[in-house]
Image (cartoon, helix red, strand yellow):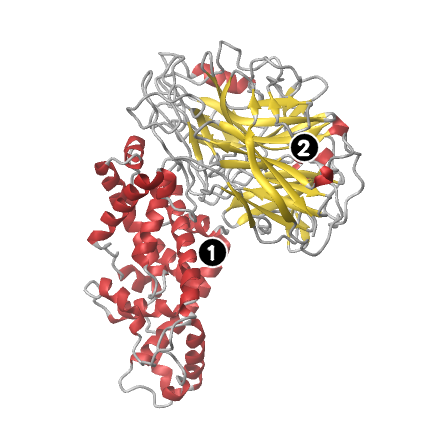
């Protein structure tokens, strides 16, 4: 296998921080797989070595966020194919400027490939296979490259499905279509190479520039089918599996690995790890520190399309963080945000947004030298604000199967008539016009509770004239503490002088309270943590604790509650065990209800939901198993229905709809596909662009459009789309503002429409800056054209 064993986490971290020996080891472990996929999938005139280097830079930057070797392969290949797609777009523009070349019956366009493989290929059919690949459609070239690795035992069918973001059944269909096209391409190669060739073929080749292309494959194939003399050019009897199995693994050029290492070091020297990974890739970034007492943490970024966050703590009250290199001085503290992840997205574990398909990664860092991550300051595992008993079975739902995507009914009036009527609007079947931007600027940090040292995420919802905010991993100071989720509430919805989130929970507007963990543990979870703590523990889960990462949040005022999607994971276990940090283990996703009257928090129990197994046993509060899709990237309420975006990949996010009162009945959920709402999300459309750690979709009455605001993976640029309805049509994304970042990219960009001014012409957005631990505020003023 190319990746039979992942390098130890400390080797990966050392490589990312610039250790030459560690970097050489990481490159040697992963470069062959990336090289072989791209060499087989890329067109001959592309600079494959350059694409490989770009891919490896992103792979190195994201390795620490990948939880297991099985997903690692599909994650790396997904990044590689994304870089290949970018290279194809650039090459397409360049090809348009080239002078036509003199036709040549020989396929010289594959000389680059043959220079690498000729000495290794010993059979005619194998050489022919190499040439035939140049004639395939782009999509079939990629499928061929992946299938070849499957035939050789380097990839499983499940991993290929993960890369392509399709079901195994659909992959089988694509493989069959690719096989048919390969056989046609092999016949074309034989006909062109024949000596003497078909005398009538020359006439069919009039105007050909000598380069393989799908168009000319079809034209030549038409001649071969109609020409009796060309019948012998059909492929031989040997099956494609036999031919592919005989193709050797390509050995990367010796200087390629050195080039990757040099570019990584150059990127670090130019501006830190964020510069090393470029601007257009999928690798995310974060800041994760670790070390003994008083020791600075190292910079790290994690996973594919996810930002890994992080923080170090030094044991006891002293902690290090930010982007300080291991062995350096302790950081100031705000950057020491444990387990921050734009990431948190991966493999099925939800943070603000759940990303599957092997594209994103999960990071759940923990303080070193600590036996566990139980709530701090001696507090009980369940706070006084939380009820640990899951809710009972919800009331029977109203069927949503026949509901057409109609315009919503009128919503209740806004608490402030000068602000946007949140979540309302008329559905349109056309893409709205983009608004003109009058001004946009970062206006400073959001004011936090004095005990908060740093916390990420930060989605919000209005509730009865107030604004409720939900956060993920939170570090406390004076003394040090850690919570996997927290909340805040404010009654001041005038953001012209900033936003104040100094309350200690999501219910009471009272400054000075110590933040508490929001989402409660069940009795079984508390028993599990107790059984696996202490010096006498000997099982595989010793030291493991549960974490709950909130995602999208919406208000249900009719039922006096705020609903919060979340992902459940275990982390902090002994190295090499299923829940070991900093990677942890995703366990599933759920929905918590904040009762705004009783101030109790309840994890809903879904009716008609899946049977989800967790490390402590069956967990009836899970709405989806790990990796099975979750809808929590963004959410809004329109006309009594909740619209939830999720199951995001770099290709975009799917959309679910459910009556708000029936959100706990999985049988009432529907998924948008080609103008209809279906019971399964297997074929659901990907409608909007995905953001790192989620995004916000809201209706803006000033421009009469739905707006999706987000910050792409690995980017510091805020982007937005406009749509005619929650399910579209949606525009392409457009840049709004590029935020300032240090060694780690910013992430968790969300909109807060409850703070809007002038009926929505002024909107406020927030994002997380991992270097400082700040939630930053952006003011965006639009003008109608």
Q: Tell me the crowding category of disc 2: few under 14, some 14 to 19, or many 20 or more residues within 10 angstroms, Cα based.
A: many
Local packing at callout 1 (Cα closer than 10 Å; few below 14, some 14-19, many 20+) is many
Callout 2 secondary element: helix
Q: Is residue 22 left or right of residue 562?
A: left
Q: Is residue 153 visible?
A: no
Rendered residue at 46%/11% (across/down) = 479
Q: Quadrant of residue 297?
A: top left
Which residue in the protein does label 2 denote? 755
Q: Position of residue 354 (x, y in %)?
A: 53, 38
As drawn, is 106 to the left or to the right of 598? left
Answer with the quarter of the image where residue 463 lies: top right
The reply to whether residue 733 is visible in this rendering is yes
Image height check: is 185 above or below 767?
below
Q: Is residue 32 left or right of residue 181?
A: left
Farthest residue, direction front: 438
The answer to which image quadrant residue 7 occupies is top left
**Mark 2–mark 1 distance (CA, rounded to whole Å):** 46 Å
Q: Nearer the viewer, residue 402 or 318?
A: 318
Label number found at residue 346 = none
Could you say where residue 705 lies in the image, as x and y percent from the top left?
Answer: 69, 48
Give the x, y percent position of residue 706: 67, 46
Residue shown at 43% from the left, 57% from the top:
85
At 37% across and 35% down in the image, what residue appears?
A: 64
In percent of width and height, residue 69 lies at: 36, 40
Q: How many marks?
A: 2
Which residue is disc 1 drawn over?
A: 171
- Residue at the bottom extreme, as displayed: 199
Pick the residue in front: 754 or 31.
754
For this orientation, the residue located farthest to the top is: 378
Question: Where 383 sits versus 661, above or below?
Answer: above
Disc 1, SS: helix
State which tag comes first along the sequence, 2 or 1: 1
């Amino acid at each position: 296998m190319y990746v039979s064993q992942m390098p130890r986490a400390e080797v990966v971290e050392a490589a990312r921080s610039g250790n030459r020996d560690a970097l050489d080891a990481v490159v040697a472990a992963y470069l062959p797989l990336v090289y072989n996929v791209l060499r087989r999938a890329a067109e001959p005139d592309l600079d494959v070595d350059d694409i490989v280097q770009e891919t490896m830079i992103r792979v190195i930057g994201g390795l620490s966020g990948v939880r297991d070797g099985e997903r690692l392969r599909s994650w790396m290949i997904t990044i590689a194919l994304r870089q290949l797609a970018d290279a194809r777009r650039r090459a397409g523009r360049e090809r348009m400027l080239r002078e036509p070349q003199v036709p040549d019956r020989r396929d010289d366009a594959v000389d680059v490939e043959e220079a690498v493989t000729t000495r290794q290929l010993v059979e005619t059919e194998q050489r022919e296979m190499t040439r035939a690949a140049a004639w395939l459609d782009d999509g079939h070239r990629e499928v061929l490259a992946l299938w070849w690795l499957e035939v050789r035992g380097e990839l499983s069918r499940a991993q290929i499905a993960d890369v392509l973001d399709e079901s195994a059944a659909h992959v089988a269909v694509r493989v069959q279509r690719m096989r048919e096209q390969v056989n046609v391409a092999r016949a074309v190669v034989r006909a062109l190479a024949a000596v003497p060739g078909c005398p009538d073929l020359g006439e069919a080749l009039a105007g050909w520039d000598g380069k393989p292309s799908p168009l000319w494959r079809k034209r030549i194939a038409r001649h071969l089918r109609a020409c009796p003399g060309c019948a012998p050019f059909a492929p031989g009897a040997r099956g494609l599996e036999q031919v592919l199995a005989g193709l050797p693994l390509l050995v990367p050029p010796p200087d390629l690995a050195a080039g990757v290492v040099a570019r990584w070091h150059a990127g670090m020297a130019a501006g830190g790890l964020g510069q090393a990974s470029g601007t257009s890739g999928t690798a995310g970034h974060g800041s994760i520190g670790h070390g003994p007492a008083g020791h600075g943490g190292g910079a790290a970024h994690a996973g594919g399309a996810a930002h890994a966050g992080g923080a170090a703590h030094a044991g006891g009250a002293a902690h290090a963080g930010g982007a300080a290199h291991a062995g350096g001085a302790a950081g100031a503290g705000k950057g020491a945000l444990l387990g921050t992840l734009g990431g948190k997205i991966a493999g099925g574990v939800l943070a603000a947004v759940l990303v599957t398909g092997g594209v994103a990664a999960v990071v759940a860092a923990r303080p070193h030298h600590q036996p566990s991550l139980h709530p701090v300051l001696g507090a009980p595992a369940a706070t006084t604000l939380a009820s640990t008993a899951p809710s009972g079975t919800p009331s029977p739902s109203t069927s949503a199967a026949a509901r057409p995507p109609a315009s919503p009914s009128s919503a209740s009036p806004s608490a402030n008539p000068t602000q946007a009527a949140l979540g309302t609007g008329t559905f349109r079947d056309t893409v709205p016009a983009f608004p003109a931007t009058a001004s946009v600027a970062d206006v400073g940090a959001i004011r936090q509770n004095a005990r908060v040292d740093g916390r990420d995420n930060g989605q919000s919802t209005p509730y009865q004239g107030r604004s409720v905010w939900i956060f993920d991993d939170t570090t406390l100071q004076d003394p040090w503490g850690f919570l996997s989720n927290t909340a805040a509430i404010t009654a001041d919805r005038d953001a012209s002088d900033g936003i104040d989130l100094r309350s200690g929970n999501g219910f009471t507007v009272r400054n000075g309270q110590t933040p508490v963990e929001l989402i409660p543990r069940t009795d079984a979870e508390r028993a599990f943590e107790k059984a696996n703590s202490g010096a006498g523990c000997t099982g595989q889960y010793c030291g493991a604790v549960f974490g709950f990462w909130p995602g999208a949040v919406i208000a249900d005022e009719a039922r006096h509650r705020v609903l919060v999607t979340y992902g459940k994971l275990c982390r902090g276990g002994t190295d090499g065990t299923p829940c070991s940090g900093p990677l942890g283990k995703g366990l599933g996703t759920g929905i918590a209800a904040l009762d705004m009257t009783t101030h109790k928090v309840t994890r809903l129990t879904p009716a008609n939901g899946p049977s989800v197994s967790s490390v402590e046993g069956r967990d009836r509060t899970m709405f989806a198993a790990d990796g099975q899709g979750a809808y929590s990237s963004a959410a809004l309420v329109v006309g009594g229905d909740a619209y939830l975006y999720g199951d995001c990949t770099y290709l975009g996010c799917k959309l679910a709809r459910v009556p708000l009162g029936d959100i706990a009945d999985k049988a009432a959920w529907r998924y948008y596909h080609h103008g209809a709402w279906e019971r399964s999300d297997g074929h659901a459309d990907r409608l909007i662009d995905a953001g790192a750690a989620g995004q916000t979709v809201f209706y803006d009455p000033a421009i009469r459009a739905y707006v999706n605001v987000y910050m792409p993976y690995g980017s510091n640029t805020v982007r937005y789309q406009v749509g005619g309805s929650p399910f579209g049509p949606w525009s392409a994304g457009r840049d709004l503002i590029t935020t300032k970042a240090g060694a780690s990219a910013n992430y968790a960009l969300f909109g807060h429409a409850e703070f809007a001014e002038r009926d929505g012409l002024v909107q406020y957005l927030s994002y997380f800056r991992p270097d400082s631990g700040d939630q930053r505020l952006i003011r965006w003023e639009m003008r109608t054209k």
